[in-house]
Image (spheres, rainbow, N blue to C red):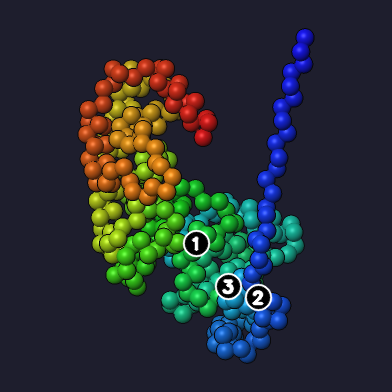
């Protein structure tokens, strides 16, 4: 009897370094507190009742940064951050209490209102409140634009789709007031993905919206607009309203299927997949053009939802949806 061949060992992926080193040298990183790049920021810290501790240029891009101790009351989260989770904040406070040290500094920028904003420390700030801290350690940047890089910076608590979407649309509303005449696609880095803007507007109206079921559809047809941010946001309000109308019809279909005896946690995903006009479209590498315009896709999806045939559904169909969901 022939021996079965042993499965080939999988090689672990290695992180190859860049061929050329980059960034600043040690001498270039060092920065004095009275350097013009941070001196005015250091003065603001003193006026707020804090103490500048050190300054340096970060070694990648060379931006000047200030390490300081700030009064707890002088720092607030950016106004467009996701909602606070009291449970997570209390758990974090408990872990810090057990450690006996508040080690992670908050990343802080100078806010538009003259106060200090933290774009990625809301839960640590809340934990500091629970612990009753007088001062917190902060890494302060004079670059206000950093406040709009929430998704890239916030690593202390993983964002779910709702969190990300709401933060993005809140950022968009804030940016409209300052830079509303700039094109929406100029904010790719801040918004991360165009469908997050649309979903954020939906979640504002319906906090319990099942965005995950529509995510695949939106990723295929939603794109950043070349129109101004102010105009594009108004257009997305219309998209959000249409999605909610479609979802209302989807709920009716689900109720009909449930009445016929179909019971599955994947009913919504199945129905949405059935009415998705681009579900069979496979994007080619490097292709950024959507298979059809967003507005047209929503019209076709709404029509498919209205014409949904309950009698065409079988348990075998739902089983395939379950297999697909478990593979994701």
Q: Earlier in the sequence, mark 2 or mark 1?
A: 2
Instruction: Give how far apart the Cα atoms at labels 2 and 1 are.
Output: 25 Å
Instruction: Give how far apart the Cα atoms at labels 3 and 1 are.
Output: 19 Å
Residue 37 found in image quarter: bottom right
Q: Which mark is residue 150?
A: 1
Residue for point 22% across, 27% down: 307
x and y percent of residue 131 in the render? 65, 64
- State the residue position of label 3: 61
Q: Nearer the viewer, mark 3 or mark 1?
A: 3
Looking at the image, residue 149 sits to the left or right of residue 27; the answer is left
x and y percent of residue 178 in the render? 35, 73
Q: Earlier in the sequence, mark 3 or mark 1?
A: 3
Residue for point 61% across, 81% down: 50
Looking at the image, residue 259 sits to the left or right of residue 146; the answer is left
Number of numbered callouts drawn: 3
Q: Residues within 10 Å of mark 1 (few under 14, many from 20)?
A: many
Residue for point 52% across, 30% down: 326
**Dot 2 lies on which element?**
loop
- State the residue position of label 2: 24
Relative vertical location of residue 214 with respect to residue 200 in this rendering, above or below: above
Relative vertical location of residue 213 with respect to residue 71 in this rendering, above or below: above
Residue 259 found in image quarter: top left
Return the residue nearer the eye: 71 or 19. 19
**Dot 3 lies on which element?**
loop
Return the residue nearer the eye: 2 or 256. 2
Residue for point 64% across, 72% down: 23
**Dot 1 lies on which element?**
helix
Instruction: Give how far apart the Cα atoms at labels 2 and 3 are.
Output: 8 Å
Q: Residues within 10 Å of mark 3 (few under 14, many from 20)?
A: few
The N terminus, quarter of image? top right
Residue 279 found in image quarter: top left
């Amino acid at each position: 009897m022939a021996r079965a061949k042993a499965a080939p060992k999988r090689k672990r992926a290695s992180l190859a370094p860049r061929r050329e080193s980059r960034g600043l040298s040690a001498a270039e990183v060092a920065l004095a507190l009275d350097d013009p790049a941070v001196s005015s920021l250091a003065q603001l810290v003193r006026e707020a009742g804090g103490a500048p501790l050190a300054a340096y240029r970060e070694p990648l891009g060379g931006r000047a940064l200030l390490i300081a101790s700030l009064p707890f009351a002088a720092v607030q989260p950016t106004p467009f951050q996701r909602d606070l989770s009291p449970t997570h904040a209390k758990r974090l406070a408990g872990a810090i209490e057990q450690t006996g040290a508040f080690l992670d500094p908050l990343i802080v920028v100078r806010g538009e209102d003259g106060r200090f904003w933290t774009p990625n420390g809301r839960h640590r700030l809340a934990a500091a409140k629970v612990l009753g801290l007088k001062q917190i350690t902060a890494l302060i940047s004079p670059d206000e634009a950093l406040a709009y890089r929430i998704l890239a910076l916030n690593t202390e608590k993983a964002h779910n789709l709702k969190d990300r979407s709401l933060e993005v649309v809140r950022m968009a509303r804030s940016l409209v007031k300052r830079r509303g005449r700039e094109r929406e696609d100029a904010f790719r880095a801040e918004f991360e993905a165009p469908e997050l803007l649309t979903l954020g507007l939906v979640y504002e109206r319906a906090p319990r919206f099942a965005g995950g079921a529509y995510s695949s559809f939106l990723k295929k047809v939603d794109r950043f607009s070349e129109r101004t941010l102010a105009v594009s946001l108004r257009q997305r309000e219309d998209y959000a309203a249409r999605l909610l109308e479609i979802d209302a019809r989807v709920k009716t279909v689900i109720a009909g299927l449930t009445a016929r005896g179909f019971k599955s946690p994947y009913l919504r995903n199945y129905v949405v997949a059935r009415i998705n006009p681009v579900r069979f479209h496979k994007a080619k590498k490097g292709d950024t053009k959507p298979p059809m315009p967003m507005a047209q896709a929503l019209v076709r999806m709404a029509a498919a939802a209205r014409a949904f045939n309950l009698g065409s559904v079988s348990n075998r169909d739902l089983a395939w949806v379950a297999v697909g969901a478990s593979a994701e």
